[in-house]
Image (cartoon, rainbow, N blue to C red):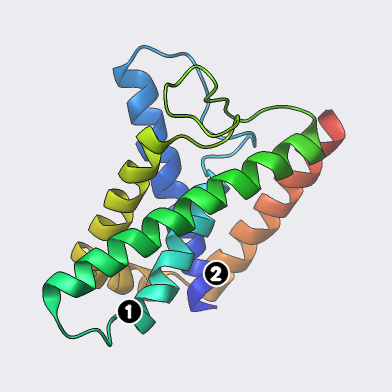
Amino acid sequence: MFYLKLFIIYSILGFLFESFIYKYNNINKHSGVLTGPYTLVYGLGGTLCYFLNNYLSYIKSPLLNIIISYTTFTIICTLMELIIGYLIHFLYKIDGWNYTYKKYHLGKYITLDYAFIWGLMAIILVKILNNYIYNQTLLISNRFTTITLVIIVLDILYTYKKT
């Protein structure tokens, strides 16, 4: 249940982050393809990085730990973006994002411009804000988690039916 709670936290944080970026850049767009205030690609990427961080913590050299963690998180988050991009296209017949206008794009769904940012964001969340996020996760009730997951599943089905 802990990782489901973490998934919800990262999905909401991702939604807030992306909504802030859109607002700051005067872009009239909703974060993600679903209706609710969560962006699941952030939830998946953040949860995977958090999970992998447990294994990377065995690297005792702080510098080596950061380098390997950053590299791992960058790859994981970029792969998540690629997989989820294709999944959204397959399920909903839309492009949730398209980076073909970027100089360093690799297909529609990933670009090196953002890959490095995803790694940095994961380092901040998993290495710096880890204790705070961990404590917040413990405060979330199992009932709230279950209700939120049901809402997300219903939102996925609603969005699928709508397209």
Q: Quadrant of the C terminus?
A: top right
Could you classify mark 2 by the number of other residues whose Cα lies within 10 Å: few (under 14), some (14-19), or many (20 or more)? some
Q: Which mark is residue 104?
A: none
* In this picture, residue 117 sits left or right of residue 7: left
Rendering coords of residue 27 (x, y %): 42, 14
In this rendering, position of residue 152 left or right of residue 133: right
User: Which quadrant would residue 62 be assigned to in this image?
Assistant: bottom left
Q: Quadrant of residue 17?
A: top left
Q: In whole angstroms, how far apart are the C-alphas of marks 2 and 1?
A: 21 Å
Q: Residue at x 60, y 57 (%)?
A: 148
Residue that sits furthest to the right in the current view: 161
Q: Mark 1 highlights which residue?
A: 56
The residue that disc 2 covers is 4
Observer-nearest residue: 86 or 27?
86
Relative placement, left or right, of 146 versus 102 is: right
Instruction: Give the residue type at disc 2.
Output: Leu
From the top left corner, tell me how far across and down residue 79 is, in percent. Answer: 54, 52
State whether residue 81 is above or below residue 20: below
Vertical relation: 15 (above or below) 9: above
Q: Secondary structure at mark 1?
A: helix
| Residue kind at label 1, given as amino acid type | Leu
Q: Residue 82 versus residue 34: which sits nearer the camera?
A: 82
Give coordinates of residue 40: x percent, y percent: 56, 49
Whether residue 7 is situated above or below residue 53 in the rendered picture:
above
Quadrant occupied by the N terminus: bottom right
